[in-house]
Image: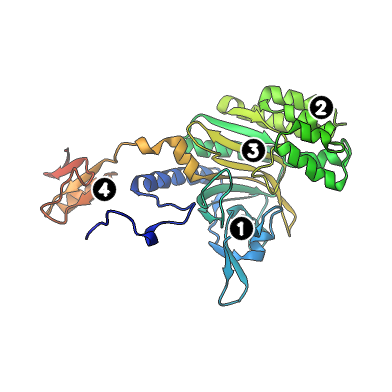
């Protein structure tokens, strides 16, 4: 078999898509197993929704889920529009509202699978990602939020991630304040959200009623200081329960992770309600995942959950510097029973197919001799 020196144009992958070569693929598999095992240990049952669904179903279960980001095409059987999933949380919501509607609540489900978008996010060039997550369906209480945040941390720890930071936010903050504490007209609500998103104090002050929201820009940073600045805002009690909830969640986390607060942050929180959080870690280029409270449209059932993405998890793990796995080279006519016994106790083996096979060049660390694994 010959190997071309340069790739043909047809061999190039579309922008935002890439191959996962053996070492990275193996590291991703280990991390996935560890994360899913952590979820299972806490009573979360795994579900496996399909890669493709009707577009209407994927777009109709969560607020803020837009079909324009989905890869869509026509089903030749039903002639209806299908779409590749861009977020598995939506599918878990459908399962909970339909096939598992009669299951006892709170319902604990977890999942893992590929998701895809038709175009990348401006903060993340990837158009295909491996998403894993857990959803506690039937509760959006403070205790549910505590359990979900702690489970997310335990899942990352099980995968070997350290130096984790958790950034809290209040996704429905503007809507809550605009109802009574800091009233806004309909068109001004979106203008205030936009200026808060860009952290533009000048622009916010120019929006009618926007000046009251200026203190939110400064209620961000390390949690202990930021939550005090948030509590100092005279919102006529509108934020009291949310602030109390944040304090309870932070107390449960303790010194297990660095905690920050950005109460007006909305990026990545298209359908979350009163509470949201983003996970970061040392060495990762972007967020490892997000979570929070939300409602499932159709059933109007509340839930709390989180999603992790394998690619930034691998960044945090620094997988590129891993040592090769211990592998035993099996020469021709080797003792097959001895090789099977080695695999039984955890060894990885690689069998020769010709006398010219080079054990070291093939990545082996040991050689089978007289029934034992001998270092090369």
Mark 4 is surrounded, within 10 Å at the Cα level, by few (under 14), some (14 to 19) or many (20 or more) other residues, namely few
Which label's residue is closer to the chain start, 3 or 1?
Answer: 1
Question: Dot 2: within a 10 Å radius of its alpha carbon, few (fewer than 14), some, or many (20 or more) residues?
Answer: some
**Measured Cα–Cα span from mark 2 to mark 4:** 63 Å
Q: Earlier in the sequence, mark 1 or mark 4?
A: 1
Name the residue that disc number 3 marks: 277
Instruction: Give the number of the disc on residue 343.
Output: 4
Q: Residue at x 39, y 48 (%)?
A: 25
> Is there any visible trace of residue 16 in the rendered image?
yes
For label 1, the crowd category at 10 Å Cα-Cα, with few meaning under 14, some 14 to 19 and many 20 or more, is many
Read off the residue under disc 1: 91
Q: Is residue 11 left or right of residue 375?
A: right
- Quadrant of the image occupied by residue 251: top right
Q: Residue at x 56, y 57 (%)?
A: 118
Whichever of callouts 3 and 4 sits on the residue coming sooner in the sequence is 3
Task: Tell me the crowding category of disc 3: few under 14, some 14 to 19, or many 20 or more residues within 10 angstroms, Cα based.
Answer: many
Q: Mark 3 to mark 1: distance in Å?
A: 21 Å
Between residue 35 and residue 82, name the one nearer to us: 82
């Amino acid at each position: 078999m010959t190997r071309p020196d340069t790739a043909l144009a047809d061999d190039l992958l579309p922008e935002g898509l890439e191959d996962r070569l053996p070492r990275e693929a193996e590291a991703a598999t280990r991390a996935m197993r560890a994360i899913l095992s952590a979820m299972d240990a806490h009573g979360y049952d795994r579900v496996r929704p399909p890669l493709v669904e009707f577009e209407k179903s994927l777009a109709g279960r969560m607020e803020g889920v837009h079909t324009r980001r989905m890869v869509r095409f026509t089903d030749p059987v039903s002639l209806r529009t299908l779409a590749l999933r861009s977020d598995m949380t939506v599918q878990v919501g459908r399962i909970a509202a339909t096939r598992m509607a009669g299951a006892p609540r709170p319902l604990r489900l977890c999942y893992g699978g590929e998701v895809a978008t038709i175009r990348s996010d401006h903060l993340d060039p990837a158009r295909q990602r491996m998403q894993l997550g857990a959803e506690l369906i039937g509760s959006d209480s403070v205790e549910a939020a505590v359990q979900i945040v702690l489970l997310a941390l335990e899942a990352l720890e099980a995968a070997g991630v350290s130096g984790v930071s958790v950034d809290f936010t209040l996704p429905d903050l503007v809507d809550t304040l605009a109802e009574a504490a800091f009233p806004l007209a309909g068109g001004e609500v979106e203008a205030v959200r936009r200026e808060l998103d860009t952290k533009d104090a000048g622009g916010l002050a120019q929006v009618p009623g926007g000046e009251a929201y200026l203190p939110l820009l400064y209620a961000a940073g390390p949690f202990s200081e930021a939550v005090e600045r948030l509590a100092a805002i005279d919102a006529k009690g509108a934020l009291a329960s949310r602030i109390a909830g944040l304090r309870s969640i932070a107390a449960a986390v303790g010194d297990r992770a660095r905690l920050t607060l950005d109460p007006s942050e909305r990026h990545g929180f298209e359908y979350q309600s009163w509470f949201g959080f983003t996970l970061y870690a040392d060495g990762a280029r972007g967020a490892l995942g997000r979570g929070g409270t939300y409602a499932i449209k159709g059933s109007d059932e509340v839930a709390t959950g989180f999603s992790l993405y394998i690619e930034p998890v691998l960044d945090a793990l620094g997988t590129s510097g891993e040592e090769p796995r211990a592998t035993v080279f099996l020469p021709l006519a080797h003792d097959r029973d001895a090789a099977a016994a080695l695999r039984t106790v955890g060894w990885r083996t690689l069998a020769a197919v010709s006398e010219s096979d080079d054990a070291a060049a093939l990545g082996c660390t040991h050689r089978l001799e007289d029934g034992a694994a001998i270092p090369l």
